Image (tube, grey):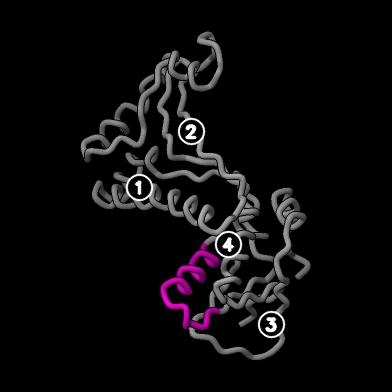
């Protein structure tokens, strides 16, 4: 396993704070009701939800390195919805499916935050929202069509901000380069590896059997 990437800053920090049991490699044959390959967000979340839905299930997860050592532990740490990409989604899959995807992504942000609160996962979550801003006149209002398209469905996850609004909420002066913007309050930031390792802890507590340093070979 010499091809494993170096540890990220996020993962180093998460491991230094950890007091969870180790998950040794799988050394013998093992049968399970469900076997999940990969200890990132998707694998851990799936394993956890399976055990929540049916605690009697024997769920096994294998990970070639450590849980959250891949992309889940080395990203920009943003919990974002797809609302700002609504028009692009409409072009790809139609408005009805775009609405479903965007709403599901919005719900996912809430689900992650709720799960962290319920299970004492300190993933440094800050729900400060994000700002789509204009730094020149040509960019002002580029978000209007997106806001209007979403609004036709009775939803307003993104709201327009004036330069004064931006100054008020960000603490910057009205002479800042941000001439106007569109703000989405739902968005949060997170320490990604703390989230991943926190999901690992909760999955273990729920009875998921996790084997790290266990690559899938066939």
State the predominant SS element of the stretch in magenta: helix
Residue 29 in magenta stretch: no
Which residue is rendered at x = 60% and y = 78% of the image?
209
Residue 26: assigned label: 3
Answer few, some or many: residues within 10 Å of disc 2's Cα (few below 14, many 20 plus, some between 14 and 19): some
Mark 1 or mark 2, which has the lower sequence index? 1
Q: Is residue 25 left or right of residue 88?
A: right
Measured in 3D between alpha carbons, the distance from the residue under mark 2 to the one under mark 4, in whole angstroms, is: 25 Å
Question: Callout 4: helix, strand or loop?
Answer: helix
Q: CA distance from mark 3 to mark 4?
A: 20 Å
Q: Secondary structure at mark 1?
A: helix
Residue at horizontal 51%, vertical 34%? 128
Q: Nearer the viewer, mark 2 or mark 4?
A: 4
Residue identified by numbered label 1: 102
Q: Earlier in the sequence, mark 1 or mark 3?
A: 3
Q: Earlier in the sequence, mark 3 or mark 4?
A: 3
Residue 187, x across and y down, in percent: 47, 40
Tell me which segment is drawn in magenta: 42-59
Q: Residue at x 58, y 65 (%)?
A: 202
Q: Is residue 53 left or right of residue 6?
A: left
Q: Looking at the image, is mark 2 or mark 3 earlier in the sequence?
A: 3
């Amino acid at each position: 396993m010499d091809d494993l990437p170096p540890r990220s800053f996020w993962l180093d920090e998460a491991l230094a704070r950890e007091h969870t049991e180790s998950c040794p490699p799988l050394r013998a044959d093992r049968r399970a009701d469900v076997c999940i390959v990969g200890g990132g967000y998707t694998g851990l979340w799936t394993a956890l939800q399976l055990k929540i839905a049916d605690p009697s299930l024997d769920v096994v997860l294998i990970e070639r390195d450590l849980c959250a050592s891949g992309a889940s532990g080395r990203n920009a740490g943003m919990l974002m919805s797809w609302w700002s990409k609504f028009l692009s989604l409409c072009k790809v899959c139609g408005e009805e499916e775009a609405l479903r995807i965007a709403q599901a992504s919005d719900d996912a942000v809430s689900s992650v935050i709720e799960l962290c609160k319920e299970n004492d996962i300190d993933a440094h979550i800050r729900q400060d929202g994000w700002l789509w801003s204009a730094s020149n006149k040509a960019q002002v209002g580029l978000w209007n069509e997106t806001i209007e398209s979403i609004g036709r469905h009775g939803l307003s996850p993104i709201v327009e901000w004036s330069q004064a609004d931006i100054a008020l909420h960000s603490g910057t002066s009205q002479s800042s380069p941000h001439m106007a913007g569109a703000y989405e309050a739902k968005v949060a930031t997170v320490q990604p590896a703390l989230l991943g390792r926190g999901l690992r802890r909760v999955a273990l507590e729920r009875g998921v059997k996790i084997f790290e340093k266990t690559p899938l070979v066939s």
